[in-house]
Amino acid sequence: MKSMNFRQSSITEETDQRRGRFYLSLHRKKPKGLISNKEDVFDFEKAHNIAVFDIHTNQTKYLFDNVKEGENITHLLFETGFDEEYKCIVFNRRSSKIQNNEMLEKRELFDVLIVCQEIEASGLKRIWRFKKDGSEKSLITEVDTSTEWRLDVFHKKVITFKRSIDSVEFDSYEY
């Protein structure tokens, strides 16, 4: 099997060492076109689902059932540790979505996955919360293309904001 190069920002594979879980993104095949006659061409920039493999039980679960064409995952974030030196929560990857994550007191890590799913046709973004084993799926919020979101670690909130020329609309949600 050929080795694939993934963009740094694409979701590929993540491990939660403490809980013994392996997360692997699933990608759709690109339609055959003039450029490629290869049978197995995947679009690795667009993940549509995440498989959660529990290393201890040898069980696999998928975050989403019946994913429609154009529903893509743009972010998968979860806590993996605490950095004593910088007094911050360590996440599975660096992301500009993670804010207010400094000078924190050490605490238990949250058993939470934060997943952003984007709907291509409408540009809507759905922010989901799951337990790290893929269970207890709940929609935190759904926002339009002009609305941004951040994960405020100190306050344990998902913050959304929509800018206009003269003002900003904010909302916040527990995660």
Image (cartoon, grey):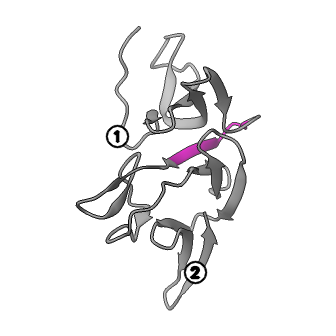
Outermost residue, right direction? 66
User: What number is the disc on residue 51?
Assistant: none
- Residue 50, x across and y down, in percent: 59, 35
Give the side of residue 39 with respect to residue 90, left or right: right
Is-magenta flag for residue 41? no
Q: Secondary structure at mark 1?
A: loop
Q: Secondary structure at mark 2?
A: strand
* Label 1 Cα neighbours within 10 Å, binned few <14 / some 14-19 / many ≥20: few
User: What number is the disc on residue 170?
Assistant: 2
133 in relation to 163, above or below: above
Frontmost residue, 124 versus 1: 1
Q: Residue at x 37, y 21 (%)?
A: 4
User: What number is the disc on residue 8?
Assistant: 1
- Residue 141, x across and y down, in percent: 68, 64
Give the side of residue 69 with respect to residue 163, left or right: right
Q: Amino acid at mark 1?
A: Gln
Report which quarter residue 62 is drawn in: top right
Where is the C terminus found, in terms of image quarters?
A: bottom right
| Residue numbers of the magenta segment | 67-75
Q: Amino acid at mark 2?
A: Phe
Q: Residue at x 28, y 59 (%)?
A: 84
Outermost residue, left direction? 85
Is-magenta flag for residue 71? yes
Q: Is residue 20 visible?
A: yes
